Amino acid sequence: MKSILDNRPELAKEVNKVAEVAGYLWQKGWAERNGGNITVNITEYVDDEIRRMPAISEVKQIGVTLPHLKGCYFYCKGTNMRMRDLARWPMDNGSVIRILDDCASYVIIADKPVQPTSEVPSHLSVHNYLISTGSPYKASVHTHPIELIALSHNKKFMEKDVATNLLWSMIPETKAFCHVVWV
């Protein structure tokens, strides 16, 4: 079966970078089982042949209009797909989506109709913001690190700014956002 990556070395390199990161996330325990998602803006690697590719899915609504995403393409991890499998077989565990001209919906164009996760609207909102600010960042990654989940069960770490300051003291060069939900 022909892949969108065939004869497109730059696009293949980008998708393989995602696969490499997925492997690290799985090996380090930063994204357990199928927890976590990756969405990468691959628009700069899209050629005219890709732009003409037909949809292989029904139109999916994003739930919000994202005007800066018009004409954009993204590689997205699939729902219920594991990071370890994405690392080995990225096009079997993710797909390429095209944002439609209404900026409120998308279709899958390659390689298989692997549905993006339910978090894709929030990831796309992040991408919309990144593009609107001229940011060079192209990826939205969200994980469920096992150690951080364990930390969240200790009320001391949930006091104002305690976990944030602890994380920043360990990895100051990283912009991190932690959202803890008490159930």
Image (tube, rainbow, N blue to C red):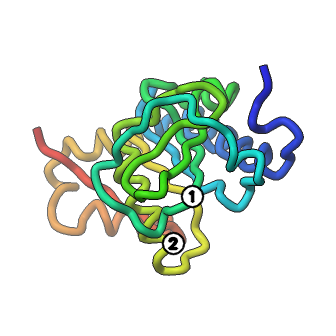
Residue 71, percent from left and from top: 57, 60
Residue drawn 59% across the image and 62% down it: 138
Residue drawn 29% across the image and 56% down it: 64
Q: Amino acid at mark 2?
A: Ile
Residue 120, percent from left and from top: 40, 45
The residue singled out by tag 1 in the image is 72
**Looking at the image, can residue 178 be seen?**
yes
- Considering depth in this image, is 125 or 4 the residue closer to the camera? 4
The residue singled out by tag 2 in the image is 131
Asked if labels 2 and 1 touch by Cβ distance under 8 angstroms, the answer is: yes
Q: The N terminus appears in which quarter of the rendering? A: top right
- As helix, strand or loop, the secondary structure at mark 1 comes to loop
**Looking at the image, can residue 169 be seen?**
no
Residue drawn 78% across the image and 43% down it: 12
CA gap between label 1 and label 2 equals 10 Å
- As helix, strand or loop, the secondary structure at mark 2 comes to helix
- 159 lies left or right of 8: left
Residue 27, percent from left and from top: 59, 33
